Amino acid sequence: VIYCGGLDHSYDTESIDKRSMRLTNGQDVIIPKLLNANPNTVVVITAGSPVEMPWIDSAKAVLWTWYAGMEGGNALADILIGKVSPSGKMPFTLPRRYEDTPVARYGEYKAENCKYNEDILVGYRGFEYDGIEPMFPFGHGLSYSRFEYSDLKLTANENGVNVEFTVKNTGNLKAAETAQIYVSDPVCSVKRPKKELKAFKKVRLSPGESAKINVLLTDADFSFYDEKSNGWKLESGDFNIYAGASSGDIRLSGSISK
């Protein structure tokens, strides 16, 4: 069974607040019944904003298509029949429930005056800082293959810090992976996120093939905006550097002093 559902632009749109994060038209009743009748059901969700999926633990496969346009059907078919391997990564965090979202946690849903109480802890930064485990973390996305990360090397030079590591396709199919590099400043004079995305690189690999990832992090990637001086500030100290498949799937880590 391939179930195609989700939202549409009559509900998932600008200028109005959704009444909830639940799927419309009784879909949260239909989907569990399908999963119970056929555990191999593929759930295809069309949406442009997070939705609750109370049935997620019973689903073997969920494909998020966004609003793919006129050729979306052909693209979906290519993925489902295995003509291509999916390689997208989530550009936002998918919470398990509305109560976990920033607007709920900071009390700004339908606020007359939005004060942005989350401050710099926007998106995945706030989920990690507040210790809330999402349904799917920022940067998450699976393919029909598997990837191994290895050999992290951090080298400081006059231009910044060069981050180098290897990504290998250990599966049986040609596929693409987007490796993500995060930076953490564990000791700082101001509130900082647990880690922040600073770079990413996508590689397409055949089975057994490896690729070297090289990324240069400059001083700007280790700095924060200082409200007292109205400028960017780099404090000396140790920084942690992470490489992984998502913000919640870190494969390699190291540290360097600035």
Image: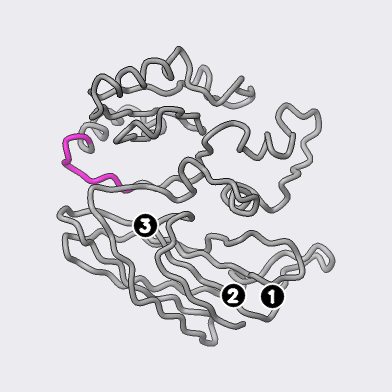
N-term mark: 3 or 2: 3
Crowd rating for badge 1 (residues with CA inside 10 Å; few <14, some 14–19, many 20+): some
As helix, strand or loop, the secondary structure at mark 2 comes to strand
Density class for disc 3 (Cα within 10 Å; few <14, some 14-19, many ≥20) is: many
Q: Amino acid at mark 1?
A: Leu
The residue labelled by disc 1 is 234
Is residue 43 positioned above or below 92 on the image? Answer: above
Which residue is the site of mark 2? Answer: 239
Query: x and y percent of residue 234 in the render?
Result: 69, 75
Q: Is residue 107 left or right of residue 24?
A: right
Check disc 1 and report its element: helix, strand or loop: loop
Q: Viewer-nearest of labels 2 and 1?
A: 2
Residue at 47 percent across and 65 percent down: it is 181
| Residue 209 on the magenta span | no
Could you tell me the amino acid type at mark 2?
Phe
Quarter of the picture containing the C terminus is bottom right
Mark nearer the viewer, 3 or 2? 2
